[in-house]
Image: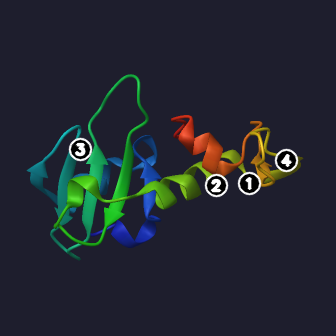
Amino acid sequence: MCECNQFSNAVYHELLPNTFYNTLKEQEIGNWVRLFRCADCGQLWRIDEWDKYQTQIAIKIPRTQNWESFDSSDYVKQLIFQYRGGETNEICKMARCNKAAVKGVAFCIDHLYDTGARK
């Protein structure tokens, strides 16, 4: 049975249940990512390859065209934001930035993402 609708547009791989892959069929292999399609609902997933230095994330994508270069930055930012519990009343420490800092760090979500953080 398909579990695709139980997850948001981006999810940390380690939080996926073991049954998640039961309905997924691998479509293509890219540069450190793989494309899967759910056999039940047709949802496409771009899933990062395992790398001990990076956080694996599964991303829902809308189409196979340019799947490898699909801009998932907004999805990942939302995932980081939720994982960290939102924002604080503090202002981002980056020069000339007036956005609220994310909990646990000194930067807003945009500048935190720009550092390479994925959690």
Q: Is residue 119 visible?
A: no
Could you tell me how many numbered marks the image carries? 4
Q: Residue at x 68, y 45 (%)?
A: 84
Query: Is 49 or 94 nearer to us in this picture?
Result: 94
For disc 3, the marked residue is 33
Query: Is 45 or 118 nearer to us in this picture?
Result: 118
Q: Are marks 2 and 1 in contact (CB under 8 Å)?
A: yes
Q: Nearest to the eye among marks 3 and 4: give it.
A: 4
For disc 1, the marked residue is 86
Q: Is residue 90 left or right of residue 119?
A: right
Q: CA distance from mark 3 to mark 4?
A: 35 Å
Q: CA distance from mark 4 to mark 1?
A: 13 Å
Q: CA distance from mark 1 to mark 3?
A: 28 Å
Q: Residue at x 41, y 30 (%)?
A: 54
Q: Are marks 4 and 1 in contact (CB under 8 Å)?
A: no
For disc 2, the marked residue is 82
Q: Is residue 71 above or below residue 107?
A: below
Which of pointers 4 and 2 lies earlier in the amino acid sequence? 2
- Local SS, label 4: strand
Which of pointers 3 and 2 lies earlier in the amino acid sequence? 3
- Local SS, label 3: strand
Q: Quadrant of residue 59?
A: bottom left
Q: Are marks 3 and 2 in contact (CB under 8 Å)?
A: no
Q: Are marks 3 and 4 in contact (CB under 8 Å)?
A: no
Q: Is residue 77 visible?
A: yes
